[in-house]
Image (spheres, grey):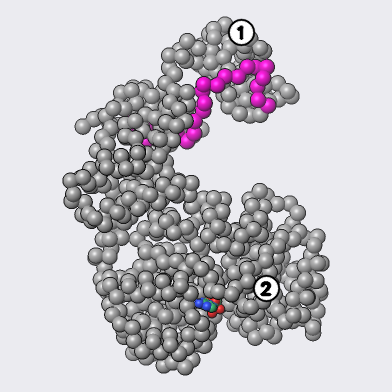
């Protein structure tokens, strides 16, 4: 047993006060924590600048020279200390605005220093505020490596004297003292298979790398370890869930399915759809509860998959429900399913906020006595008590609206939980999805149905509005329909509403009655009015649908071929992709036109450019991920993936994949980790608990 678990206050140079700060500000409590406090970047300290050839920017640099003079300059509040600093090539200033009393005492005039800090340029003169200083002689002695670590820090730490330099020294001391006391956490066969360096070496090199190459080796090793144990935990959790939670057994495919499949299926399934149906069927027959995520880009055909597996539930004597995030979408699901099922004996009903009391009463009765096979509804509706006779399958079409937590509400009361399928149109790269959702299985529809013409996406500035309107008229002349969508952002709902109404008026002027008919749908309308307006558009009575983002999810109107997004710079990427997915559903060539003002932020420009360049939801999702970080992904907060210390699920996704496969392979052969060669893994794992981050273990 080494001293790594020792409280940080016992480290030389720390003490109780600093220990408290380290704990509060950085969550560093033990020696171990400090060694696993990895640098956020590195500075090449083998490089020195001359004062007469400094870079003309604000970079961090290093200079050798001496301080020849110190003076104090009065300023608005208090004063500042200015030191004249010279090397063989020139003179510059070092400046302190606070804490200079203490610094002044230790400064030695006319002795050679190495200074380090961020350049500041003012009227052509360079200075460095609050530089780090070290006597040159000492600097050479201290130099452990040419790359110096830079750690995350806080204002408070710096103000209390825990500067970068101090933290660097603390870590360096600790490595000297404890650096050889690390027990390996990965078995030899893994290390040698992937040519990973030892834990000891990795810890040393990650703080003070001797070369760029050593640094990469160290980071790779530590990232692998982090990913590997995280994946092991996730996979084990999934295995345990499967063993523990019994599910209804849907053992057969019967009449409902076969009749529909053979007689009423309006098209043949794509290979991707077939594969996914098969994956789901396997789950349903396994005797364990299914908990599966179905990913498929907009328009990839998830609805028919949902229907087919609901039919399997019915064939096995169970009921099924399909939940949608909005009333419009629930209704749309209902209508398309009714149509598909019209010549079958399957009984299906819709329950939303606008269902009348009488209908509601009948519906509840049929639900309870089992007459009703399929219930479609909004999420809100399920909050009021509906009682199924025997709900066997719940499908949540969440697009990207529902949070993970809400799902559980639906069936928390039933003894045996129904099988659950969550459908989402927010594509996440597959390994990433498995890592994020952890205890969900993932199916993927990765190909669109055949014959789709790729949507043409264009970016137009406001000053091209007239030609955009002319284009809309052309399209309408050819019998097409057009969406015009305005942003809706919670904080400025009123402003957005005004925007929308202004837009409506201006469009009404350019597209006047009776030649043109316009529908309008927005959040402040009653659902009755919304449905009415929607209906008119669906029936082709109106050619233009003006809407806020309420239409973004799921709406399927094949004759609509143009999507105009107003103020597109205000939309997120996945939202834009969702909106675009509303067109391109019929046979005609479809268009998505992104309108914007002339001033675009870098982010907005990247988003719009990405949309113009790519129709691929996965590619778009990756850009979105890079722009916004994984924190915005649905469900990710629960996953622990944000607590990673060194791995980055986006940048290191390949390594993540390798680690996941390795973990999977090991558990497949040795699910209880009984083999001799896996004892180290078992021990390491045992010292982890799921909710603490993986570095908090001691071996
Ligand atoms: P989403 O995955 O976005 O929910 P939908 O289920 O609404 O997509 O399907 C989009 C459109 O594609 C629908 O009009 C549907 O009828 C059609 N579709 C689905 N599967 C196929 C297929 N295999 N062949 C042809 N058209 C299909
Ligand atoms: Mg859909």
Instruction: Answer yes or no: is residue 17 visible.
Output: no
x and y, in percent, of residue 275 in the image: 41, 71
- State the residue at coordinates (50%, 62%): 427
- State the residue at coordinates (52%, 21%): 46
- In this rendering, is residue 253 above or below 67? below
Q: Which residue is mark 2?
A: 589
Q: Residues within 10 Å of mark 1 (few under 14, many from 20)?
A: some
Seen from the viewer's position, the closer of residues 550 and 562 is 562
Assign a secondary structure to mark 2: loop
Seen from the viewer's position, the closer of residues 377 and 313 is 313
Q: Residues within 10 Å of mark 2 (few under 14, many from 20)?
A: some
Q: Pointer 1 and pointer 2: residues touching (CB < 8 Å)? A: no
Assign a secondary structure to mark 1: strand
Mark sitting earlier along the chain (1/2):
1
- State the residue at coordinates (52%, 88%): 339
Q: Is residue 289 left or right of residue 92?
A: left
Range shown magenta: 30-56
- State the residue at coordinates (71%, 60%): 459
x and y, in percent, of residue 635 in the image: 44, 59
Marking on residue 452: none
- In this rendering, is residue 425 above or below 208? below
Instruction: Answer yes or no: is residue 473 visible.
Output: yes
Does the stretch in magenta take in 35? yes
Q: Measure the C-alpha gap from mark 1 to mark 2.
A: 75 Å
Q: Which residue is mark 1?
A: 68
Q: Quadrant of the N terminus?
A: top left
- In this rendering, is residue 358 above or below 245? below
């Amino acid at each position: 047993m080494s001293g790594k678990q020792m409280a940080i206050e016992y480290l030389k140079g720390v003490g109780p006060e600093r220990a408290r700060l380290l704990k509060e500000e950085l969550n560093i409590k033990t020696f171990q924590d400090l060694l696993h406090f990895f640098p956020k970047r590195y500075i090449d300290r083998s490089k020195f600048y001359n004062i007469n050839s400094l870079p003309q920017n604000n970079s961090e640099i290093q200079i050798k020279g001496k301080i020849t003079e110190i003076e104090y300059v009065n300023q608005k509040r208090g004063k500042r200390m200015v030191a004249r600093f010279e090397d063989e090539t020139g003179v510059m200033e070092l400046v302190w605005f606070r804490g200079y009393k203490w610094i002044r005492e230790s400064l030695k005039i006319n002795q050679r220093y190495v200074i380090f800090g961020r350049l500041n340029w003012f009227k052509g003169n360079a200075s460095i505020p609050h530089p780090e200083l070290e006597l040159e002689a000492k600097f050479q002695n201290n130099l452990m490596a040419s790359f110096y670590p830079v750690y995350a820090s806080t204002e408070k730490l710096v103000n209390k004297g825990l500067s970068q330099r101090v933290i660097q020294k603390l870590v360096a001391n600790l490595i000297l003292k404890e650096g050889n006391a690390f027990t390996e956490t990965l078995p030899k066969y893994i290390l040698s298979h992937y040519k990973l360096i030892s834990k000891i070496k990795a810890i040393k090199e990650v703080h003070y790398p001797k070369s760029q190459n050593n640094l990469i080796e160290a980071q790779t090793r530590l990232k692998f370890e982090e990913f590997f144990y995280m994946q092991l935990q996730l996979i084990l959790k999934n295995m345990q869930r499967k063993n523990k939670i019994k599910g209804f057994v849907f053992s057969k495919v019967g009449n409902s399915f076969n009749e529909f499949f053979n007689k009423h299926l309006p098209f043949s399934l794509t290979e991707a759809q077939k594969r996914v149906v098969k994956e789901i069927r396997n789950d349903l027959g396994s005797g364990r509860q299914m908990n599966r995520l179905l990913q498929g880009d907009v328009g990839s055909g998830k609805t028919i998959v949902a229907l087919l597996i609901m039919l399997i539930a019915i064939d096995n004597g169970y009921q099924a429900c399909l939940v949608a995030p909005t009333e419009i979408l629930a209704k749309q699901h209902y209508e398309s399913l009714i149509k598909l099922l019209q010549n079958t004996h399957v009984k299906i009903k819709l329950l939303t906020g606008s269902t009348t009391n009488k209908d509601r009463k009948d519906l509840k009765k049929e639900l309870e006595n089992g007459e009703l096979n399929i219930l479609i509804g909004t999420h809100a509706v399920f909050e009021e008590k509906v009682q199924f006779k025997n709900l066997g399958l719940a499908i949540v079409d969440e697009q990207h609206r529902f949070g993970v937590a809400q799902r559980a509400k639906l069936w928390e009361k039933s003894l045996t939980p129904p099988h659950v399928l969550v459908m989402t149109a927010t594509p996440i790269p597959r390994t990433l999805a498995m890592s994020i959702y952890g205890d969900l299985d993932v199916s993927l529809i990765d190909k669109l149905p055949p014959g789709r013409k790729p949507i043409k996406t264009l970016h137009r500035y406001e000053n091209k509005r007239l030609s955009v309107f002319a284009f809309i008229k052309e399209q309408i002349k050819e019998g097409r329909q057009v969406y015009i969508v305005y942003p809706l952002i919670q904080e400025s709902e009123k402003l957005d509403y005004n925007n929308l109404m202004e837009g409506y008026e201006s469009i009404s002027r350019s597209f006047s009655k009776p030649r043109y008919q316009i529908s309008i749908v927005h959040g402040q309308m009653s659902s009755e009015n919304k449905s009415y307006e929607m209906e008119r558009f669906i029936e082709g009575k109106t050619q233009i649908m003006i809407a806020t983002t309420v239409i973004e999810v799921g709406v399927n109107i094949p004759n609509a071929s143009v999507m105009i997004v107003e103020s597109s710079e205000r939309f997120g990427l996945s939202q834009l992709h969702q909106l675009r997915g509303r067109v391109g559903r019929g046979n005609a060539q479809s268009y998505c036109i992104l309108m914007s003002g002339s001033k675009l932020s870098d982010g907005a420009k990247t988003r719009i450019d990405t949309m113009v360049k790519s129709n691929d939801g996965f590619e778009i999702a990756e850009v979105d991920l890079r722009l916004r970080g994984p924190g915005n992904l649905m469900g990710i907060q629960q996953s622990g993936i944000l607590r990673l210390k060194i791995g980055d699920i986006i940048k290191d996704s390949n390594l993540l994949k390798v680690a996941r496969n390795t973990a999977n392979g090991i558990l497949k052969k040795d699910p209880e980790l009984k083999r001799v060669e896996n004892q180290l893994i078992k021990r390491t794992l045992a010292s982890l608990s799921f909710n603490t981050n993986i570095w908090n273990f001691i071996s």
